Image (spheres, rainbow, N blue to C red):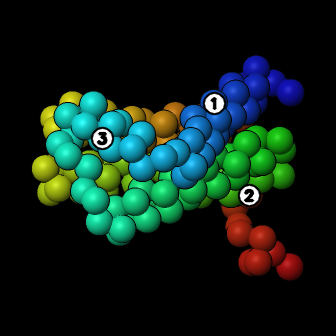
């Protein structure tokens, strides 16, 4: 395995582990979520059922994504097209999330961190992927 391949694997696994930590929010008491919300300067955590539902469902999706990143890191050659797709998705998602943050009135520090970090990680994965793995010219379904 080349040095660049190792960096791709490490980056996929680090992002995956960070996303897997979202499992804590899935199973944490509502009181902990409320405390975290207030500690971040986001005001009082709403008591509506939809708030807890969305927080926990979003967290399980993050954790699932983290597991997927770890899985594809086990064979970066075999999953090269999927890694490229995931990296492009992360890159584009960063800009969309930044727009959502602005529209929803998130604090400036949040806007400056969340979207740009997501886009930056996606771009970094794309650069490592390009330097590491030869991506086929066609999608598998187009090959004879």
**Can the viewer see residue 87 in this picture?**
no
Q: Position of residue 71 (x, y in %)?
A: 78, 48
Residue 1 percent coordinates (x, y): 86, 27
For residue 82, above or below residue 18 = below
Q: Earlier in the sequence, mark 2 or mark 3?
A: 3
Mark 3 closeness class: few <14, some 14–19, many ≥20 residues within 10 Å: some
Question: Would you say residue 97 is visible in this rendering?
Answer: yes
Residue sitting at x 76%, y 25%: 6
Q: Which residue is mark 3?
A: 37
Q: Which residue is mark 1?
A: 14
What's the residue at 25%, 56% (across, down)? 46
**Looking at the image, is 36 positioned above or below residue 137?**
above
Front-lying residue, 42 or 143:
42
SS of the residue under disc 2: loop
Q: Which dot, 2 or 1, sits closer to the camera?
A: 1
Q: Badge 1: few (under 14), some or many (20 or more) residues near its Cα, within 10 Å? A: some
The image's mark for residue 136 is 2
Answer with the quarter of the image where residue 14 lies: top right
- The C terminus - image quarter: bottom right
């Amino acid at each position: 395995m080349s040095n660049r391949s190792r960096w791709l694997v490490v980056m996929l696994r680090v992002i995956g582990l960070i996303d897997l930590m979202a499992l804590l929010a899935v199973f944490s008491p509502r009181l902990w979520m409320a405390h975290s919300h207030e500690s971040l300067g986001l005001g009082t955590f709403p008591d509506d059922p939809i708030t807890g539902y969305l927080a926990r469902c979003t967290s399980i999706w993050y954790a699932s994504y983290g597991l997927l990143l770890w899985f594809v890191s086990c064979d970066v050659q075999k999953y090269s097209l999927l890694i490229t797709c995931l990296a492009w998705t992360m890159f584009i998602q960063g800009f969309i999330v930044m727009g959502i943050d602005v529209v929803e009135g998130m604090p400036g520090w949040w806007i400056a961190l969340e979207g740009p970090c997501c886009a930056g990680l996606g771009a970094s994965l794309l650069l490592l992927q390009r330097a590491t793995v030869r991506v086929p010219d066609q999608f598998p379904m187009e090959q004879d």
